[in-house]
Image (tube, grey):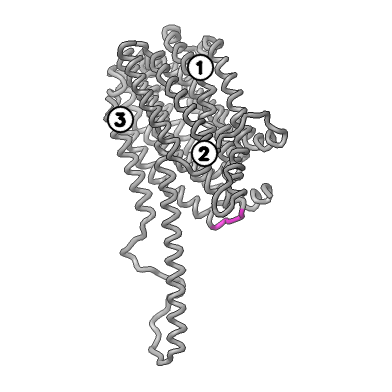
């Protein structure tokens, strides 16, 4: 049941891998045109002149070869970082789709419909606090680069910079756990969830909400691994946790316990606890684990420079998802189940763009602070070019999965028809979002939060207006594509028009 979905995902990863590899290979069939290229000179019988010209050509060739080798090395480094990071970010949505498959097969369309508001309450709340992990990436990457010695970053500086974010994430996560424990019925009532679905949705939220604190702390720890360019350790941890999750789904949803939505959530809870504690142990072993302490006033101010704008940006994006969810709930149970299936595919496939965002967030800050505009813009161009290949390939994979594979997640023919009808718009939504995620990393690296927030607010109101006229799942996805497409276009124009705000950002950080 899972093998076909994993097969489609593996094809997408291979396509992305080949695109990056093709991008880094020089074209052998074209001649190399050098800057100092002249027509043939007449033969001059002078050893002095001959030595002079030969030395110039040799120097020019050596410089060109060195630049070409440096470019290839940079692309290889991007590849070594991006592919394992891709596995990390794909794991959680892949597990969500596996949960959907187990619930859809054992409970039916009612179970899938109950998962829609339940995952909204859990995943969107965790997404709301994602500004903490993004702030960790920004603060720790700058500390890691600015305190570097002998070509290596400063582990101690990165660890200290991440300490306030880890402390705040645990406090906010504990508060969120208490909200889920005591206010879940109120949340479902506010969302106007069908009373027939509330029991299953409540069970799911209670199980997942019990480990909200662990999930939020894990995101901060993961950002710290990314900053230090270690993507293999967290990939191993999350892969093992995924195996535990799948085994738990089989035990708690199929046999011996047929727990439905609650069983799927219990499996995810067990996997989250295992991966969180394992990740903490790995950080401690690498002497990267931040200490838990009350942040200083200066640390809160530095954190606030990131968290304030990022929180506002995240709120506008989350509000857009909430509007989409509310509109989908007016379409009926079958359409809502189809919407849940389509959104899980959307969330799964758009995370193929997250490694490109991480490349921007980890590689660009040091270049921007040093005022190295030439290398920074070259890096941005490389990231955007890779995002184009990824957008087309991954978007096509998402479309094919929705059109050919909805039977993997639901045996209801009505739900399958909804997913198939939404497939073309799913392609467009995934493609636009992957490019948006890629440019998002560059915008955060340049701290252009005002533009990000302004563009996000305008696109939010445009989407809210369009949603009023939506009567199908494909129309809802179309509004999402319009919103992300407009943000991507204006952000790319802004990045190149302002040269990533390199001079202004460098002055602010000195």
Give the vertical position of 389 relative to 169 (above or below).
below
Q: Nearer the viewer, mark 3 or mark 1?
A: 1
Give the vertical position of 39 relative to 201 (above or below).
below
Q: Is residue 503 left or right of residue 400?
A: right
Q: Secondary structure at mark 2?
A: loop
Give the vertical position of 341 relative to 356 (above or below).
above
Earlier along the polypeptide chain: callout 2 or callout 3? 3
Q: Quadrant of residue 42?
A: bottom left
- In the image, what residue occupies the spot 39% across and 24% down? 96
Seen from the viewer's position, the closer of residues 138 and 443 is 138
Earlier along the polypeptide chain: callout 3 or callout 1? 3
Q: Is residue 373 magenta?
A: yes
Residue occupying the far front of the picture = 285
Q: In the rendering, which numbered label is found on residue 423? A: none
* Magenta residues, start to end: 370-374
Earlier along the polypeptide chain: callout 2 or callout 1? 1
Q: In the rendering, which numbered label is found on residue 210? A: 1
Q: Is residue 131 left or right of residue 392?
A: right
Q: Is residue 140 magenta?
A: no
Seen from the viewer's position, the closer of residues 108 and 158 is 158
Residue 422 place in picture, x, y as percent: 35, 28
Q: Which residue does the numbered mark 2 point to in the structure image? A: 286
Majority SS type along the magenta span: loop
Q: Secondary structure at mark 1?
A: loop
Q: Quadrant of residue 372?
A: bottom right
Q: Nearer the viewer, mark 2 or mark 3?
A: 2
């Amino acid at each position: 049941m899972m093998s076909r979905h994993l097969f489609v995902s593996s094809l997408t990863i291979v396509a992305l891998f080949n695109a990056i590899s093709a991008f880094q290979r020089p074209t052998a069939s074209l001649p190399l045109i050098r800057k100092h290229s002249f027509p043939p000179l007449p033969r001059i019988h002078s050893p002095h002149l001959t030595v002079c010209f030969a030395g110039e050509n040799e120097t020019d060739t050596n410089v060109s070869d060195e630049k070409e080798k440096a470019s290839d090395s940079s692309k290889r480094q991007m590849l070594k970082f991006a592919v394992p990071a891709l596995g990390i970010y794909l794991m959680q949505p892949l597990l969500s789709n596996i949960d959907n498959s187990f619930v859809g097969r054992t409970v039916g369309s009612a179970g899938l419909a109950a998962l829609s508001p339940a995952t909204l309450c859990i995943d969107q709340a965790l997404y709301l606090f994602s500004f903490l992990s993004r702030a960790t990436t920004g603060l720790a990457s700058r500390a890691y680069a600015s305190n570097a010695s002998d070509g290596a970053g400063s582990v101690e500086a990165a660890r200290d910079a991440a300490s306030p974010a880890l402390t705040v994430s645990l406090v906010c996560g504990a508060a969120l756990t208490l909200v889920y424990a005591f206010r879940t019925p109120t949340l479902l009532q506010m969302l106007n969830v069908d009373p027939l679905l509330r029991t299953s949705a409540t069970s799911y939220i209670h199980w997942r909400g019990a480990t909200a604190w662990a999930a939020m702390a894990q995101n901060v720890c993961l950002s710290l691994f990314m900053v230090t360019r270690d993507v293999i350790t967290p990939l191993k941890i999350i892969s093992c946790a995924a195996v535990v999750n799948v085994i738990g789904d089989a035990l708690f949803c199929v046999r011996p316990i047929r727990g439905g939505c609650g069983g799927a959530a219990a499996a995810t809870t067990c996997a989250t606890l295992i991966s969180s504690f394992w990740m903490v142990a790995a950080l401690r072993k690498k002497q990267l684990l931040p200490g838990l302490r009350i942040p200083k006033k200066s640390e809160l101010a530095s954190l606030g420079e990131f968290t304030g704008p990022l929180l506002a940006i995240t709120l506008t994006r989350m509000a857009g998802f909430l509007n989409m969810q509310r509109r989908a709930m007016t379409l009926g149970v079958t359409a809502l189940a189809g919407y849940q299936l389509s959104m899980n595919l959307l969330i799964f496939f758009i995370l193929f763009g997250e490694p490109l965002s991480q490349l921007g967030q980890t590689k660009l800050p040091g270049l921007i602070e040093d005022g190295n505009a030439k290398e920074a813009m070259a890096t941005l161009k490389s990231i955007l070019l890779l995002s184009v290949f990824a957008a087309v390939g991954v978007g096509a994979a998402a479309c094919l999965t929705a059109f050919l594979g909805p039977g993997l997640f639901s045996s209801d023919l009505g739900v399958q028809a909804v997913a198939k009808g939404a497939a073309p718009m799913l392609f467009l939504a995934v493609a636009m979002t992957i490019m948006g995620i890629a440019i998002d990393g560059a915008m955060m690296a340049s701290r252009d939060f005002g533009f990000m927030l302004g563009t996000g607010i305008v696109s939010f109101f445009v989407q809210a207006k369009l949603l009023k006229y939506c009567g199908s799942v494909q129309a809802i996805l179309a509004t999402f594509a319009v919103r992300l497409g407009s943000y991507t276009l204006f952000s790319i124009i802004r990045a190149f028009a302002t040269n990533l705000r390199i001079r202004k950002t460098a002055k602010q950080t000195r």
